[in-house]
Image (cartoon, rainbow, N blue to C red):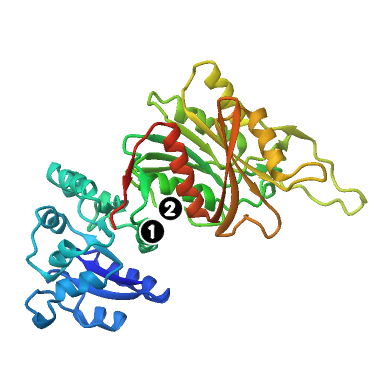
Amino acid sequence: MRIILGIGGGIAAYKAAMLLRLFTEQGHDVVPMPTRSALRFVGEPTWEALSGHPVNTSVFEDVESVNHVRQAERADLVVVAPATADLMARVVGGRADDLLSATILTATCPVVFAPAMHTQMWENPATRRNVAQLREDGYTVIDPAVGRLTGHDSGAGRLPDPREIYRRALAAASSAGAALPDLTGCRLVVTAGGTREALDPVRYLGNRSSGKQGIAIAQAAADLGASVELILAHTEVSAPEGSEKLRIRRVSSALELENAVGEALGDGRSVDGVIMTAAVADFRPRSVAVSKIKKDPSADDAPTLELVRNPDILRGLVEAKSRGEHGAFLVGFAAETGSEDHTVAELGESKLVSKGADMLVVNEVGTDLVFGQDQTAATILVREAEEIRSEAVVGTKIDLARRLMTRVASHLNIGSRTARG
């Protein structure tokens, strides 16, 4: 894929060099296109050495090729990182006074902006209007991360991690031209990861959930404009950076997870949907040792553990909904291995009925299936009147996340938009 990497004139320009390397390491051809002010932060030799392309900033360079048109026509994707407040304002105004803005104005491929600026600039009404207009025009604008800024300040405006920009940019490219739900104004709660039930200060009962699928769903929902609270148990992958659209809360045990979901539903703000991807332990020890359980050299037998059942969080949410305590659309996840008597699909349909959820996603799992993998195979089951309808999804966990959000949006009666490109 041929990618134009636009670099705005901000201190975060140095991170764009890392983003360029991520793209090229995966075989993409990247044309760096810094603004003149960006070159005051990171110079031409860096961009040329990393990309293998010459650097131009003006439409009056390489004039005979009509460079801005040639670059736009050949590009499969344009990524602008960092996107400064000034650069976004110029694009909204339709200005084409340097090579980058002229190329963006000419491009018909997906264009992704990753803003970075001081918090006050990001929150300024003019910037807010410009971001809203860019999104309305079909561009993808990634919300900045919250964290340390230039100097001693902290807040919203930090450039997202280059790996996050990389993921979001490729997602925008792959979904170009597709009808996607617009989840702006929608509030979702997503749980992810595996719970751990302490035996003593160093040991626990757990499971093999990596958290990848739940994180992918939370990110997909935020990408589409939803406000997401991600309740994250233990994972084998890095947690995403928090942002205005994606708030992260950490938990450990099943009881902590249940409490966090209850607080999210009961904080006075309406929740449109709860997506329970977390792998919740069915049992926990009746008592937790206050010190590490020691092996007794004189005993032949291992200590006996007495277990008690953990609450069924999804069923509790269903019961609370039936009592009118909330109106959230409830999506459960089930990991099944099948049995001698029943297929995975049959077990999934039975669980959908017994749980009473609005929708259930069933994965067939095993030692080399689903857990920790990027690929997945799942069946989405949904109750419609007296019928259970199913849809099989085979692909990456990101593919499943997007398809699931499209299905959820249809049941919430949320309209769609067509991705630019």
Q: Residue furthest top?
A: 323
In whole angstroms, how far apart are the C-alphas of marks 1 and 2? Answer: 8 Å
Front residue of 73/359: it is 73
Front residue of 349/141: it is 349
SS assignment at label 1: helix
Q: Residues within 10 Å of mark 1 (few under 14, many from 20)?
A: some
Front residue of 152/98: it is 98
Q: Is residue 129 above or below residue 384?
A: below
In the picture of the structure, the residue carrying the numbered disc 2 is: 240
Q: Residues within 10 Å of mark 2 (few under 14, many from 20)?
A: some
Front residue of 39/365: it is 365
Residue 190 in the image: x percent, y percent? 48, 40
Q: Is residue 276 above or below residue 392?
A: above
Residue 40 shows in the view:
no
In the picture of the structure, the residue carrying the numbered disc 1 is: 164
Q: Is residue 170 above or below residue 410?
A: below
At 23% across and 70% down in the image, what residue appears?
A: 73
Q: Quadrant of residue 236?
A: bottom right
Of the two numbered discs 1 and 2 on the same chain, state the one appearing first in sequence.
1
Q: Is residue 11 left or right of residue 335?
A: left
Q: Is residue 126 left or right of residue 314?
A: left
At 12% across and 69% down in the image, what residue appears?
A: 37
As shown in the figure, which amino acid type bears the numbered disc 1? Glu
SS assignment at label 2: loop
